[in-house]
Image (cartoon, grey):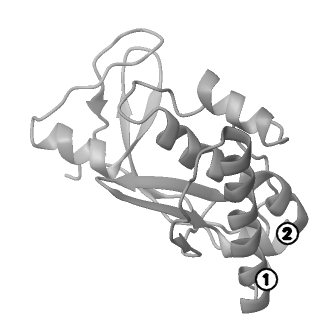
Amino acid sequence: MNLYNHSMQLSVANTYQIEPIADQQKIQVVDRTLEVIAKASELYDQKFLSIPIAFDLRGKCAGMYRRSGREKLIRFNPWLFAKYYQHSLEQTVPHEVAHYITDCLWSGSKVKPHGKEWKSVMQLLGAEPAVTGNYDLTGIPLKQYQQFDYSCGCKTHQLSIIRHRRLVKGQAEYRCRSCQGLLQAVAK
């Protein structure tokens, strides 16, 4: 008996494939990123170093700032940039640079990712402090996630493979936010 219902989120609706941005556009995105960092340096009267930029992000996320120890990186989704190029230059680039600047200015502090500090940097950079984009993902290659059905007292939940494995190993327990019931694997 299989205790876990394996369901996949697939991008079935995608009938055509968007091509990622070309090398020339990547250069423009890097240049725009460096411009925004230079603008922040001028506005804060502080030198912010340029950081590596990668075009390896996939799925529904347009950009991501990541710090691991001393290493800092901005990642962009070349497919979403191709579909929403101008918007990405105007919003996504400043959004991710604002995360970088916030990290530099308030390093070591407990700062929420899209908190007041980040919002203040976004406004100073002249960008709308929008937290997430709402993109039509038609033609964008999406990540495929394996999910597992769990239930509580009021509904069925879809858990990621990471949470599923934690439950199977007894390393965690998860509760429903609505009824506070303990999540149990759905018997199949």
Q: Nearer the viewer, residue 157 or 32?
A: 32
Q: Quadrant of residue 159?
A: top left
Q: Where is residue 48 drawn, in percent x and y?
A: 56, 54
Q: Is residue 67 above or below residue 155?
A: below
Q: Nearer the viewer, residue 90 or 142?
A: 90
Tag 2 residue: 85
Asked whether disc 1 touches disc 2, contact meaning CB atoms under 8 Å apart, the reply is: yes
- Residue 13 visible in the shown view: no
Q: Is residue 37 left or right of residue 165?
A: right
Q: Where is residue 35 drawn, in percent x and y?
A: 75, 63
Farthest front residue in view: 45
Q: Residues within 10 Å of mark 2 (few under 14, many from 20)?
A: some
Q: Where is residue 85 drawn, in percent x and y?
A: 85, 69
Type of amino acid at the residue the image marks with label 1: Gln
Q: Is residue 139 above or below residue 27?
A: above
Farthest left residue in view: 170
Q: How many marks?
A: 2
Q: Where is residue 52 drawn, in percent x and y?
A: 51, 71
Type of amino acid at the residue the image marks with label 2: Tyr
Tag 1 residue: 25
Asked which secondary structure carries label 1, the reply is helix
State the CA–CA distance, disc 1 to disc 2.
9 Å
Question: Mark 1 against mark 2, which lies toward the viewer?
Answer: 1
Q: Nearer the viewer, residue 135 or 170?
A: 135
